[in-house]
Amino acid sequence: MADIDEASTLVRPRNDEAKHAVFALTVIDGPDEGARFQLDSSAPCPVLLGQSPACEVRLSDREASRRHAAIEVAGARVRVRDLGSTNGTYVEGVLVFDALMFPGESVRIGSTTLRLELLSEPAASLPSTDRFGRVLGASPEMRRLYPLIERFASSTIPVIIEGETGTGKEVLAEAMHEAGPRAAGPYVVFDCTAVPPNLVESELFGHERGAFTGALASRKGVFEQAHGGTLLIDEIGDLDLALQPKLLRALERSEVRRVGGDGPIRVDVRVFAATRRDLDHEVQAGRFRDDLFHRLAVGRIELPPLRRRKGDVALLVRHFWTELGGRGAPPAELLARWQDDPWPGNVRELRNACARHITIGDLTPADLPDEAPAQPARGDDVIGGVIAEGLPLAIARLRVVEAFERRYIEHVLEQNEGNVSRAARASGIGRRYFQMLRKRR
């Protein structure tokens, strides 16, 4: 028997400790009748169903959307999600947005019906390791990723790393670079959200002197800087649609053309792409090119949010506590409280919470004495004041980041006339996380 969450159409079974299994989807009705597709719990990302060449379960059904639905094996269950399809997704005749299927049940996509069946219980167990490089996690959700991460790291294929903000996408990318064949080469990070839109092309591909106002000298772009090594394009889901064909061309031809340049420049770069966005939805909505996604998603990893990583909070807290110079062990009551927290900011938020607790305990900035004002001085005075305190680097950095966050939240709220929802969207973060930052002011 299953429990039904009234807040959604997601059906959750009572047994969360179900074993991993291998399933098959067989088309029993529709244009592709007889086709059979295997689903393996070792896959790190959902399997896509639809007409697009990027779909692992590719259908010729004209009533199916290009990216119609996603299916993911979770233990001995199979989760199916509609991706905003035109005609909807039906499990056992019921229109669903997000649901769990069990062996013997069917899913209808357009005019195609597929039946789920259990093939076998895999003999291989999850690896016992609790880390890959600087990526930590002993939960089943993380351990099932490590074998695939190792295979990706040892190759030179492009990889898309997906996950909510703060899940450790950049840490994972750097860990794969360090464990891969290009470890001796440069590792360059380009954040699509950190550069003004009119300068993104120049930052990616470089520019020649005089190419535009302010271009006083020729400059290499990040592709040239990463030659012989690895380039991480962070938040690629935010890349302007007009620039996506130029990025695709650079990836396919292994060459770039500087802004204002006359000819192509050959580059040898391995590319990782990270995003907090659901690229399947972005492609479906026309905000991300299907062909660029297909070119990047040769390898694909989805990092789970911290709230789904059972037991990892305690492991991470102990690691951060030691790393940040905490005395003794973290208090048991603190661990118990934090393990029940949803952590909307994920691992990044947890690390900042550890640093804050080591520095000021359970106090908030408002609780501090007058000689440590809750509203610090602005500009260079903040940095100079923090440096003068002689704090460890991690804690000093946290103090500066908190001062920046306060000023940023004040500014973006002012720009959006105090509307929290609009301010959160303008900031590129979730409303809940924005509210959490706002309360810290």
Image (spheres, helix red, strand yellow):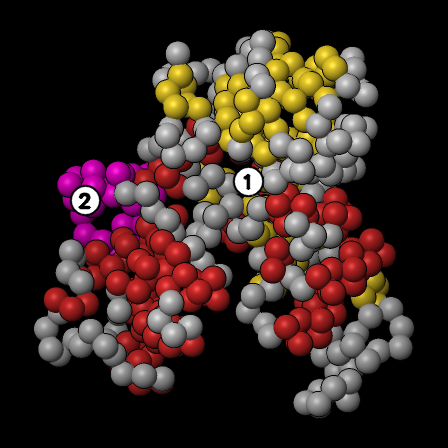
Which x, y percent locates residue 305? 43, 41
Q: Is residue 368 visible?
A: yes
Q: Compared with residue 365, is residue 135 higher up or lower down, i.e. above or below?
A: above
Residue 194 picture quarter: bottom right
Label of residue 334 in the image: 2
Residue positioned 78% across, 85% down in the render = 211
Label of residue 65 in the image: none
SS label for mark 2: helix
Horizontal side of residue 317 vs 121, given as left or right: left
Mark 2 is surrounded, within 10 Å at the Cα level, by few (under 14), some (14 to 19) or many (20 or more) other residues, namely some
Q: Nearer the viewer, residue 176 or 51?
A: 51
Magenta-tinted stretch: 314-340
Q: Nearer the viewer, residue 35 or 407?
A: 35
For the residue marked with disc 2, what is the amino acid? Leu
- In this rendering, the label closer to the viewer, 1 or 2: 1
- Which residue is most to the right? 263
Label of residue 302 in the image: 1
